[in-house]
């Protein structure tokens, strides 16, 4: 999964989003309609995703495509990659940067505080 996630481009991500939202295998025409893009472009993106191991194709009357990479797994990989690349692996430095640059509102900080408190309490119980 890590290799497939590492290779997904922004254009391919839009195709993955359609497949994740569908929750079932889709044909090329269904993906194309959802993206409102040229069929050859979508076909190329699906072919590339299959080659990368991110999508599987199944032959019925036509080919149907389903994601092999879960949305949460890709999000976790990309988040960690961002933290590693921009913040030397420190999630704390990333959050500090968000706070310092006004990207987190007080409500966001309150929600994070509640989340951290809950995680801390769970850790104490184990």
Image: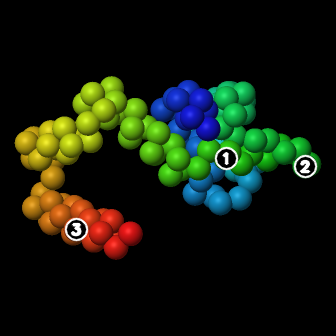
Q: Secondary structure at mark 3?
A: helix
Query: Residue drawn at (22%, 39%), measured in percent from left and top?
Result: 94
| Image location of residue 80, percent across then percent down | 39, 38
Q: In the image, is 77 to the left or to the right of 96?
A: right
Q: Nearer the viewer, mark 1 or mark 3?
A: 3
| Image location of residue 100, percent across then percent down | 8, 42
Q: In the image, is 23 to the left or to the right of 95?
A: right
Per the rendering, the mark at residue 60 is: 2
CB atoms of marks 1 and 2 within 8 Å? no
Counting residues from the start of the chain, the first of labels 2 and 3 encountered is 2
- CA distance separating discs 2 and 3: 50 Å
Q: Secondary structure at mark 2?
A: loop
Rendering quarter of residue 82: top left
CB atoms of marks 2 and 3 within 8 Å? no
- CA distance separating discs 1 and 3: 35 Å
Q: In the image, is 76 to the left or to the right of 70?
A: left
> In this rendering, is residue 48 above or below 67?
above
Q: Is residue 86 visible to us here?
A: no
Counting residues from the start of the chain, the first of labels 1 and 2 encountered is 2
- CA distance separating discs 1 and 2: 17 Å
CB atoms of marks 1 and 3 within 8 Å? no
Residue under label 1, please give it: 67
| Image location of residue 70, percent across then percent down | 59, 50
Residue under label 3, please give it: 117
Instruction: Compare residues 121 and 4 and report the one nearer the observer.
Output: 121
């Amino acid at each position: 999964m890590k290799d497939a996630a590492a290779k997904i481009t922004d254009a391919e991500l839009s195709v993955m989003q359609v497949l994740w939202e569908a929750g079932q295998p889709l044909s090329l025409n269904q993906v194309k309609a959802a993206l409102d893009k040229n069929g050859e472009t979508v076909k190329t993106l699906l072919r590339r995703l299959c080659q990368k191991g991110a999508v599987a194709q199944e032959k019925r009357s036509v080919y149907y495509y389903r994601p092999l990479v879960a949305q949460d797994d890709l999000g976790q990989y990309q988040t960690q990659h961002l933290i590693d690349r921009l913040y030397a692996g420190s999630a704390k430095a990333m959050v500090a940067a968000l706070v310092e640059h006004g990207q987190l509102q007080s409500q966001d900080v309150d929600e994070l505080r509640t989340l951290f408190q809950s995680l801390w309490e769970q850790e104490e119980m184990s």
